[in-house]
């Protein structure tokens, strides 16, 4: 599956990563359509502290748990692929990613 993103790059979700999400994060396993929304209309994007090539896209959804952020972690390299999907109550600390506006 291929997702679009607000930063203008396509993101691949492989079968292996989909299975990882389903088995490791069952609370969000039914929210793959929300992942698409999160990549296109995030509330915030953060740069991962451990890997500068990973961006964390956050979007708040009131219908995930009792209201949580959906986090879509994407590795940007030759393939640009979705690493994982999980939910959290808060946005992690770290450097905020600023979207570059087209001139």
Image (cartoon, rainbow, N blue to C red):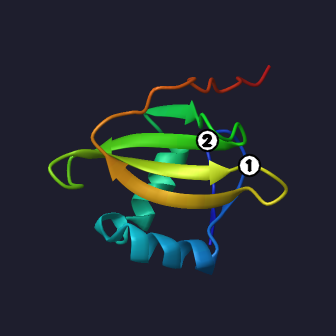
Q: Which mark is residue 46?
A: none
* Residue 32, picture quadrant: bottom left
Residue drawn where x is 72% and y is 42% of the image: 53
Residue drawn where x is 58% and y is 71% of the image: 17
Residue 11 coordinates in the image, percent (x, y): 67, 58
Q: Which mark is residue 55?
A: 2
- Horizontal side of 92 relative to 90 (left or right) equals right
Quadrant, the C terminus: top right
- Horizontal side of 34 relative to 9 (left or right) equals left
- Note whether 93 is above or below 71 in the view shown: above
Residue 40 coordinates in the image, percent (x, y): 54, 45
Residue 28 coordinates in the image, percent (x, y): 34, 64
Secondary structure found at label 1: loop
Residue 39 coordinates in the image, percent (x, y): 54, 48
Name the residue tied to disc 1.
Answer: 76
56 or 7: nearer the viewer: 56
Q: Residues within 10 Å of mark 2 (few under 14, many from 20)?
A: many
Which numbered disc flags the more N-terminal residue, 1 or 2? Answer: 2
Q: Residue furthest left?
A: 66
Q: Residues within 10 Å of mark 1 (few under 14, many from 20)?
A: some
Residue drawn where x is 47% and y is 31% of the image: 44
User: How many tags in the picture?
Assistant: 2
Residues at marks 1 and 2, CA–CA distance in whole angstroms? 8 Å
- Note whether 20 is above or below 28 in the view shown: below
- Horizontal side of 97 relative to 92 (left or right) equals right
Residue drawn where x is 32% and y is 35% of the image: 90
Q: Residue furthest right?
A: 78
The reply to whether dot 1 and dot 2 touch (C-beta < 8 Å) is yes
- Horizontal side of 34 relative to 12 (left or right) equals left
């Amino acid at each position: 599956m291929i997702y679009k993103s607000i930063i203008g790059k396509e993101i691949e979700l492989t079968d292996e990563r989909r299975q990882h999400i389903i088995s490791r994060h069952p609370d969000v396993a039914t929210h793959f359509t929300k992942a698409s929304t999160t990549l296109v209309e995030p509330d915030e994007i953060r740069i991962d502290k451990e890997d500068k090539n990973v961006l964390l896209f956050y979007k708040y959804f009131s219908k995930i748990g009792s209201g949580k952020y959906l986090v879509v972690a994407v590795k940007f390299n030759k393939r640009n692929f979705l690493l994982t999907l999980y939910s959290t109550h808060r946005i992690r600390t770290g450097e905020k990613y600023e979207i570059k506006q087209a001139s």
